[in-house]
Image (cartoon, grey):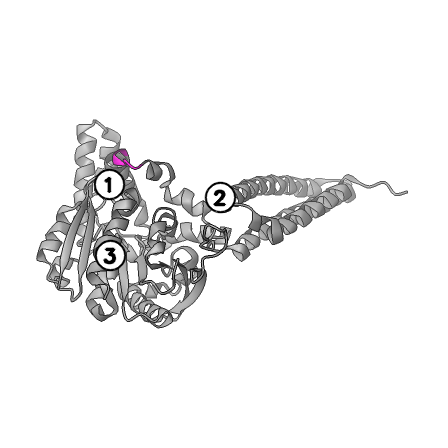
Amino acid sequence: MQVTTASHRRVWVLAIIELITLLYVIGVRRLLPPAAAAQFELLALIGLALTFAVAVLITLWELLAWAFAKNRADVREKFGGRMIFIIAILILVILIVAGSQWTAHTPAIKGIDGKPLPNSIASLEKVELGGVDQWLIIRGHDVNKPVLLFLSGGPGASEAARVLRFNVELEKHFVLVIWEQRGCGKSYPSINPKSHLTVDQYTSDVIELTEILRKRFKQEKIYLVGHSWGTIIGVRAAQQRPDLFHAYIGTAQMVDVRETDRMIYDLVMDYSRKSGDTKFVQTLEKMGQPPYFGKSPIQPYATLFGREYAIFEASNIKDEAFRKDGDILLLMLKQPEYGWLDRLYYLLGLMNTFNVVYPQLQDMDFRLDATHLDLPVYLVLGRHDMNNPYQIPEEYYNLLDAPSKQLYFFEDSGHGMIWEEAGLFHKLMVETVLPETYY
């Protein structure tokens, strides 16, 4: 009988592990709660990455030894076994990532009997906008309810995870459509060509998507809700095609990006000086006042905005659910609509799309070029929002001419008011906006 070598045993073990992984991807994964599956896979991917790195280093060392060895046959056998091991790890990684992409879904909306609600919709689907594929998450208890299109903040980010976690109540009253914008999240591959990452193109995408939704759900008009960056393209779309929308709802309404960012800079600088944070004062002085340009403007902006959030907003979060579960990155890692490739896309979008789009916003001022909107307008501001201090959007509201307009302050929240005070936002949408505008 031939004695099995260590290399052969290793190959058999890896083959069995790959078979188990394949069975997990095909069947077991669908039976696990999304958060549990994501946590398990994250640990597995980290473990595989570390193992892969160690195996590569050992292989390089053995390759170096082979170059100087007298008996190269022995070293060659070890080297061959190591390469099989590395290839097997790569196959495991591919299985996990491909499986997560294949099983990405948005869960069915179920009744008390555990079965999908009749006439409900829970769909994760691709649509072509502006000549490129982009993704939608569509959820609603009744497909005949009014359609609400949500425009995430950014640019370069998706806020789908927060909407799905904290705004589930909207699904009872609307067909909620969360759009993964070009160059963001699941739609990150549409970043090319980067020359199309313009405010005009995003606005065109909003209008084209709205026409698709009107036709699909047999609605004359839909609701348009924007948050932060989403309010910029939201205002532009409402300005160009007010006939498509029952109302425009701007939350954390952006007005003048340059002035807003300089206000943030001054607030953070003043706080840092008064608190004796000399090191960060020096960091701010080195950066200078916004705007920032160059190859990677996200770096100074992330430094500024991150410190602003830590100083002024994090400490004012009163909602325990948001304090516990509101971290957008952790939510994104657990949401079932994303596979592991999508999660990588999300991180890439934060950097690459922001770097292209944000510098384009520096000459925007809605107080000069968007003072008339021919549809009902509702603006929602967080009293503790220092990422977009309320003074500028409040001034814009006072200048705004519209058939009807209302301004709401959420007193116990900051930039994420629609999640920090989700109940108040839902009440506004259901008890005020719908009765006043849905005919």
Between 255 and 39, the one lying in front of the other is: 39
Segment tinted magenta in the rendering: 315-319
Percent position of residue 135, x then y: 41, 61
Tell how many labels.
Answer: 3
- Secondary structure, mark 3, is helix
Percent position of residue 437, x then y: 21, 62
Q: Is residue 279 above or below residue 32?
A: above
- Of pointers 1 and 2, the one earlier in the residue sequence: 2
- Secondary structure, mark 2, is helix
Res. 320 visible in picture: yes
- Give the label on residue 231, or none: 3
Q: Amino acid at mark 2?
A: Ala
Q: Residues within 10 Å of mark 3 (few under 14, many from 20)?
A: many
- State yes or no: discs 3 and 2 in contact (Cβ < 8 Å): no
Residue at point 38%, 65% (across, down): 193
Is most of the magenta stretch helix, strand or loop?
A: loop
